Image: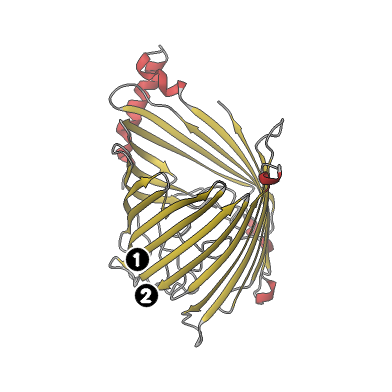
């Protein structure tokens, strides 16, 4: 996909910016309705896998991230014009060649295999709006079942492409678009897309290892404020295509008590250049009352391969957690989760979560017996609610994972965030 399609939007925007210097009413809203924010993200990551007997026993790095987001309003008229921009900077605070590979710092290496001192990226997006329909062209951060950008490290993953969303029909949201490049969370460069292929995904590729075309579309229907269903389709040209059905429901049992249901089913097939063949069923039910939350989940893979998703993205699976997603071939897994919001005790901003997941029946080509794995996660977070440090967030994430077909892992992450509205 050529980015030449962005030129008409860019030229109209340039005309508007020039005209705005004499305060033409048609362009005033593009600036009056604009907003900008700066997010500071300080991230320490430690992953220990010395018990696996590999040469490098752990990864450990510390870095500072800056994420600048700018969103304009729209010009007046039948078709409104606007623009968005994002600036990303990652700064190394501590790293060494024998501890690299956390995903916080640039994959490019300097002399001696050392991580570079910093890396950055800039993205721009032109946008058009007519009624309740919006077309965005340029840098995108898609978040839908068939393609979910990854934001689990220092800087977010981004994509390049075009995305049309329409909400002109009440209770119906429609999406249609194409992506041609991605910038991974630890890179400054755009590149073609590939399919994630973990230890036991068992995906075989033909002559197409990467693709510069991912087409997607979807429809979400809100039956009521508490019930919605959706269908989405995605196709990574020459590698795989995917159908995705979802249902979300929230039942208010009584005042202060709810039961939430999250059901997901997908069917992934090859697109002429792989052996992708997977059906994924997932269900998560969460009971909430008086600050407590108790969740139970089940996930089942079937077919000749594991789940298919674009490399670097978050696969939309109910058992996607801190380290694993339990999406291997034939894997069946369950999850038990507990959350507590301390606002119920008069301490707003303080939250706690813990969960345990177990998976088995994994088809591992290098083993005669079935693969098994489990993971245990805990998170403790606090966001300051008032005063000069309002919006300062602190989070500790701890995880342990054990497997008979992959590395055993113990992990800690310490994250400090601060968001500042610039205008």
> What residue is at 38 percent from the left and 34 percent from the top?
126
User: Residue 204 occupies which quadrant of the picture?
Assistant: bottom left
Residue at 34% in and 71% down: 277
For disc 2, the neighbor class at 10 Å (few under 14, some 14 to 19, many from 20) is some
Q: Quick one: 249 or 329, which is closer to the camera?
A: 249
Residue at 53 percent of width and 49 percent of height: 254
Q: Position of residue 362 (x, y in %)?
A: 48, 78
User: Which residue bears the numbered disc 1?
Assistant: 268
User: Of the numbered discs in the image, which one, if any, rests on residue 115?
Assistant: none
| Horizontal arrangement in the rendering, residue 264 relative to residue 199 (left or right) | left
Return the residue nearer the eye: 63 or 117: 63
What kind of element bears circle 2? loop
Q: How many marks?
A: 2
Image position of 304 with respect to 283: above or below: below
Q: Is residue 302 above or below residue 4?
A: below
Which residue is pictured at 37% across the width and 69% down the height?
Answer: 279
User: Which residue is identified by label 2?
Assistant: 303
Q: Secondary structure at mark 1?
A: strand
């Amino acid at each position: 996909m050529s980015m030449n399609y962005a030129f008409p939007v860019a030229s109209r925007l340039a005309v508007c910016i020039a005209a705005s210097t004499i305060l033409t009413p048609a362009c005033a809203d593009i600036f009056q309705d604009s907003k900008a924010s700066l997010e500071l993200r300080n991230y320490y990551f430690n992953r220990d896998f010395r018990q696996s007997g590999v040469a490098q026993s752990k990864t450990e790095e510390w870095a500072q991230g800056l994420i600048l987001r700018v969103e304009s309003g729209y010009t007046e008229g039948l078709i409104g014009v606007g623009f968005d921009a994002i600036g990303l900077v990652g700064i190394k605070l501590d790293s060494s060649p024998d501890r690299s590979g956390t995903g916080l710092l640039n994959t490019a290496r300097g002399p001696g295999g050392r991580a570079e001192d910093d890396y950055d990226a800039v993205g721009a997006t032109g946008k058009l709006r007519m009624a309740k329909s919006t077309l965005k062209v340029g840098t995108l951060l898609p978040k839908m079942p068939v393609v979910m950008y990854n934001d689990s490290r220092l800087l977010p993953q981004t994509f390049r492409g075009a995305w049309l969303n329409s909400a002109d029909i009440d209770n119906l949201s429609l999406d249609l678009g194409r992506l041609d490049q991605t910038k991974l969370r630890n890179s400054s460069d755009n590149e073609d897309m590939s399919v994630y292929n973990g230890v036991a995904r068992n995906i075989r590729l033909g002559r197409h290892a990467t693709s510069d075309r991912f087409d997607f579309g979807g429809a979400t229907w809100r039956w009521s404020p508490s019930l919605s269903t959706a269908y989405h389709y995605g196709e990574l040209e020459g590698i795989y295509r995917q159908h995705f059905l979802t249902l979300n429901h929230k039942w208010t049992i009584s005042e202060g008590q709810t039961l939430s249901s999250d059901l997901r089913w997908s069917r992934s097939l090859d697109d002429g250049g792989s052996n992708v063949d997977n059906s994924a069923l997932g269900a998560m039910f969460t009971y909430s009352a008086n600050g407590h939350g108790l969740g139970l989940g089940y996930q089942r893979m079937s077919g000749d391969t594991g789940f298919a998703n674009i490399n670097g993205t978050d696969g939309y699976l109910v058992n996607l957690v801190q380290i694993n997603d339990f999406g291997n071939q034939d894997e069946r897994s369950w999850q038990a989760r507990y959350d507590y919001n301390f606002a119920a005790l008069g301490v707003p901003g303080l939250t706690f979560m813990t969960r345990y997941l177990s998976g088995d029946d994994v088809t591992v080509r290098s083993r005669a017996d079935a693969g098994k794995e489990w993971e245990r996660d805990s998170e403790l977070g606090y966001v300051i609610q008032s005063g000069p440090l309002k919006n300062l967030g602190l989070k500790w994430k701890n995880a342990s994972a054990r497997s008979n077909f992959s590395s055993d892992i113990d992990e800690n992450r310490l994250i400090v965030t601060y968001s500042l509205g610039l205008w």
